[in-house]
Image (cartoon, rainbow, N blue to C red):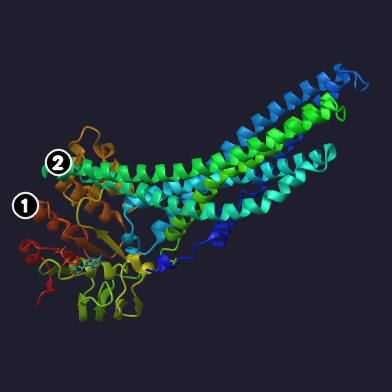
Amino acid sequence: MKVKNAVHGVRGGLAYLKRVSCGFRKKIVGYCLLGLLSVSLSLGFIGVSKWVIDAATGTMEGSWGIGIVLLAGLVVLQLVCDGIDNWMSVGMQVGVGNRLRHRLFARLLQSRWNAMEQFHTGDVMNRIEKDVSSVVGMLTVSLPSFVVTGMQLLAAFVFFCFLDARLPWVVVGVFPLFLWIGRFYLKRMYRYTSKIRKSDSRIQSIIQESLQLRSVIKALEQNDRYIGKLDRQQKTLQARLMQRTRFSILTRTCVSAAFAVGYLIAFVWGTVHLHQGLITFGTMAAFLQLVGKVQRPILDMARMLPSWVEVFASIDRLRELEALPQEREAAQVLSPTTPDVVVDKIDFGYDKGEALVFRQFSYCFRAGSRVAVMGETGRGKTTLVRLLLAFAVPQSGNIRLCTTDWEVEVSAETRCNFTYVPQGNTLFSGTIRDNLLMGNPEATEEDMVCALHTAVAGFVFDLPSGMDTLVGEQGSGLSEGQAQRIAIARALLRPAFILLFDEATSALDADTELRLLENLKKHCAGKTFIFVTHHTAVAERCDAVLRLDV
Ligand SMILES: Nc1ncnc2c1ncn2[C@@H]1O[C@H](COP(=O)(O)OP(=O)(O)OP(=O)(O)O)[C@@H](O)[C@H]1O
């Protein structure tokens, strides 16, 4: 798919980091400067300690007591820096994380209704949680550390040159070799990391779907099968992680061995020069500390590499989500009065090459009428609702909202003219009141009571907490029929001209269904009702029946 064509690569990844860091760049630079101050303090510590040792051993003149006071001052400053560092780091992590999740969540909600079908929700959740935190870690921890470590290395290198100009160039000499090995290392790590992220997503998908459908799993006695499925995926993840760890340990051991040899050379060099009286004890101590100061940052940078690789794999996954086709955002287009809904010679099929669901289909839903849409399962009833709501767009023909002197083709902007009760249980966790307010955030207590009565949901007033009763995910705690009636009340609160009921009364008993239809007729005069239904009782109380299977 198009999403797959999203341009991968380091350049794209860097551009993404630049984009998402917007608004935090000053803080990140400030954080880097703080890190540099911290490095300067630690180098200052080395310089002063050399002076103190040389003064104490009589190699240099001066009061080593002042040096000790200076050292204590430098330690205090370092502690203050560490405190500010922690404070800034947490603040940035929270801020950047919130910003990234906001950006992704908004894009997912604004994407076209079926754009996400290619992803499992568990995979999407995994990306929002783990890939976002990996990018946050990069921007707020790894990137500043990389800058500071690089500067630390440079500063130590310059300091080194003052002590002896030859040794540091050995480091420069081996640098091209490091780059060459690094290229091979990065490629391999990227491959391992991408596979690991995929396995991780699969695990989350299995857990999420199984928990959502746990009653189905229980009823079909498939517990062991699903636990086994999880175990197999976990084993795959473990194998992939171990493979990456093996490779990582191998490369890290090689780097550490190279550094151990480097330290040994530096130590022997220092000892020989000390023995020959060419350097002082202070220089020897400073020299050995500096060797550490050069080696530590290089090792730290090498250790950061896996997290850089992980970030680029994560960025690719986040960019796939961000590349989902979006709905155009524009002002609402509200009809002046209840409009006719004219479906004019539409052709529509979901996928290219597959049979069309509608071929040259036309129909007019008259303003203020009640129409039952019927037909065998799979004939396109729900698809018609999606087309009216402009979730899907016909390949040819059009659907228009028309009044005597006003006409507009349906689009995301005309959705405000409709209210929709989908199939199944569509309540959110929270109170019944929260659910009702989703239909109309400005609804008064009186409006909500009226909507509940019209939807034959008077049972809500018998609950101990009434409208403040808490319901669980997907309306758990309520019966299917109770949840359907609250969903209908929610839809009635929305100030819209056309009400779309997609098998919205399927869980109601015949008597309750009839009372609901009577109430709708009485309280919602002038509005258009489109009932997708298999119930003949509903069809008998409508002004027209649209059969899709004839
Ligand atoms: N998201 C989708 N992607 C691809 N094909 C789809 C999608 N949704 C539905 N279809 C196909 O479109 C056709 C019409 O489906 P639709 O859901 O509109 O039928 P329906 O009449 O509402 O069925 P039911 O009475 O079972 O709800 C079916 O062949 C179905 O397989």
Does residue 215 appear anywhere in the picture? no
> What residue would you read off at disc 1?
511
At label 2, counting other C-alpha atoms closer than 10 Å, the crowd grade (few under 14, some 14-19, many 20 or more) is: few
Q: In which quarter of the view is residue 274 placed?
A: top right
Please say if 80 is above or below 89.
Answer: above
x 81%, y 19%: residue: 68
- The quarter of the rendered structure image containing the N terminus is bottom left
120 left or right of 142 in image:
left
Residue 403 in the image: state x and y as whole percent: 30, 77
Q: Earlier in the sequence, mark 1 or mark 2?
A: 2
Determine the residue located farthest toward the right in the rendered image: 61
Please say if 283 is above or below 491.
Answer: above
- The quarter of the rendered structure image containing the C terminus is bottom left
Does residue 122 appear anywhere in the picture? yes
Pointer 1 with pointer 2, Cβ within 8 A: no
Helix, strand, or loop for circle 2? helix
* Foreground label between 1 and 2: 2
Checking the image for residue 469, the label placed there is none
> What residue would you read off at disc 2?
218
Q: CA distance from mark 1 to mark 2?
A: 33 Å
Amino acid type at circle 2 is Lys
Q: In front here: 327 or 164?
A: 164
x 20%, y 61%: residue: 501
At label 1, counting other C-alpha atoms closer than 10 Å, the crowd grade (few under 14, some 14-19, many 20 or more) is: few
x 25%, y 56%: residue: 492
446 left or right of 299 in image:
left
Q: In front here: 428 or 445?
A: 428
Helix, strand, or loop for circle 1? helix
Amino acid type at circle 1 is Asp
Residue 145 in the image: state x and y as whole percent: 63, 42
